[in-house]
Image: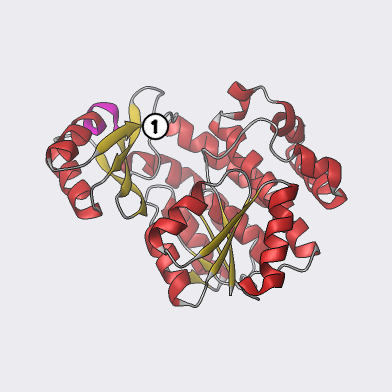
Amino acid sequence: MIAFIFPGQGSQRVGMGQALAEAFPICRDTFAEADAALGEPLSTLCFAGPAERLTLTENTQPAILAMSVAVARLLQSRGLEPAWLAGHSLGEYSAHVVAGTFSFADALRIVRQRGRFMQEAVPVGEGAMAAVLGADAEVVARACAEAAGDDVVSPANLNAPGQVVIAGSAAAVARAGERARALGARRVVPLPVSAPFHCALMRPAEARLAPLLRALEARDPRLPVVANVDGEPKRDRAAAIEALVRQVSAPVQWEAVVKRLASEGVRTYVEVGPGSVLAGLVKKIDREAVVQSVEDEAGVAAALSLAEGGGGGA
């Protein structure tokens, strides 16, 4: 059984999607559709940069969404259909476009706002995120609780065993990192992000985004989408939208997502979009999983041959 999984912010790179758009009309048309929906040349930003503009959160989010949907449409046009869908943070929006929960154009516009609201929630430099490696989630949560004081710091991405990202005010993240090392963490790596995502500091962004999400013309997903907030499949429009609302300030439960997919019989994961971050995380969570990242022609061919070779069907 196959799941499509979609990457989130951080997987972007200048040049993403260009070769696919040149080789496949369905990808070229998808980028053109994105340009029309936003009223600006998002495709040019993806293909040519500059990097400093592509990495602005309000640009990164629609750019990754467009790339991911282009790849998904190409794979589906070649007969590769998933049985399950999931995405990491922003990637959950890509999953819902493929599920038909809302339109591609609406998703592009809403994630642009999502990126803008998240960036505006905390002034640049006041928040931070860091990856804590080599400690389990309970130890990281304890480090955050003991280091917070009057500030905010908490687990933001529970990515895989021994890999938890924390987020909050810059000073509290630094203190929590030191405490985590004292409690046995192997390394603490500050992340180059522009805002502290998936923590209580994002509640103003959640409050601004919620009415826009709830106003979307939405339908029941045609395929189950396993949500970040609780690792549970969303099968109706109301549950899908509320999971996206809560996701803004809640931690990404990626380990729980993959474990749920595995429990449903998923053995083959196709990472749809730029990068291969999720492939590495899936292998840490489920060592028996077969994973293929798809961001170029070679990845497309590998994913199609994987399915044909019995890697799983819909």
Q: Is residue 305 magenta?
A: no
* Vertical order, 6 against 67 (above or below): below
Residue at image location 53% in from the left, 48% down from the top: 90
x, y percent for residue 176? 20, 36
Mark 1 lies on residue = 191
**Majority secondary structure in the magenta region:** helix
Nearest to the observer: residue 311 or residue 56: 311
Which quadrant would the C terminus be assigned to in this image?
bottom right
- Boundaries of the magenta span: 169-173
Nearest to the observer: residue 151 or residue 145: 145
Q: Is residue 171 magenta?
A: yes
Residue at image location 43% in from the left, 28% down from the top: 192
x, y percent for residue 97? 66, 58
Query: Is residue 227 found left or right of 276 in the rendered image?
Result: left
Query: Is residue 168 found left or right of 99 in the rendered image?
Result: left
* Vertical order, 79 against 22 (above or below): below
Query: Is residue 286 found left or right of 148 in the rendered image?
Result: right
Q: In the rendered image, is residue 59 in sight?
A: yes
Q: In the rendered image, is residue 88 in sight?
A: no
Question: Which residue type carries mark 1?
Answer: Leu
Nearest to the observer: residue 212 or residue 186: 186
Residue at image location 46% in from the left, 54% down from the top: 245
Residue 204 found in image quarter:
top left
x, y percent for residue 171? 23, 26
What SS does tag 1 mark?
Answer: loop
Residue 287 found in image quarter:
bottom left
